[in-house]
Amino acid sequence: QVQFVESGGGLVQPGGSLRLSCVASGTIFNRYAMGWYRQAPGKQRELVAGITSAGATIYTDSVKGRFTISRDNAKNTVSLQMDTLKPEDTAVYYCNTAFYPSWGARDSWGLGTQVTVSS
């Protein structure tokens, strides 16, 4: 059974930074693309950033230049460095394995980690 454990969220002021981490278990991690997704209150879950098994990356337009996704296959970990955070980045953030190239999520969701950007 695939499991994801996300961490690193919190409350931060606009312009601040956070680094999210996700540890995956129960899957052959290095075979799959990985994505960070987020869901804000009243909105659908959306892809924020993705990274292929080869290390190619993709970002939604609203976070380009501010967020950086990376992966460590030896540790089954995918990370999201978030800089210059804005109030509109407030959401619960989730990781998942992803179908490529559609970036739809493959597996069940973890609990996520809450990110709140507010002064």
Image: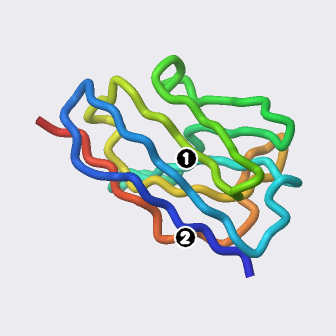
Q: Could you tell me which quadrant the C terminus lies in?
A: top left
Identify which amino acid the numbered label 2 is placed on: Gly
Report the Cα–Cα distance between label 2 and label 1. 15 Å
Q: Mark 1 and mark 2 in contact (Cβ < 8 Å)?
A: no
Task: Determine crowd level at label 2: few under 14, some 14-19, many 20+ residues with C-alpha closer than 10 A.
Answer: some
Q: Which label belongs to residue 110? A: 2
Identify which amino acid the numbered label 1 is placed on: Glu
Q: Which residue is under mark 1?
A: 46
Instruction: Locate residue 109, reporting x and y percent.
Output: 59, 69
From the viewer's side, name the closer residue of 14 and 38.
14
Report helix, strand or loop for mark 1: strand
Q: Say left or right for 23 vs 1.
A: left
Instruction: Locate residue 22, reporting x and y percent.
Output: 56, 57
Q: Residue at x 55, y 23 (%)?
A: 61
Q: Which label belongs to residue 97? A: none
Q: Residue at x 55, y 46 (%)?
A: 46
Which badge, 2 or 1, is on the more N-terminal residue?
1
Q: Could you tell me which quadrant the N terminus lies in?
A: bottom right
Q: Residue at x 40, y 56 (%)?
A: 92
Q: Give above or below for 108 relative to 37.
A: below
Instruction: Locate residue 15, reporting x and y percent.
Output: 26, 24
Q: Give above or below for 115 relative to 111.
A: above
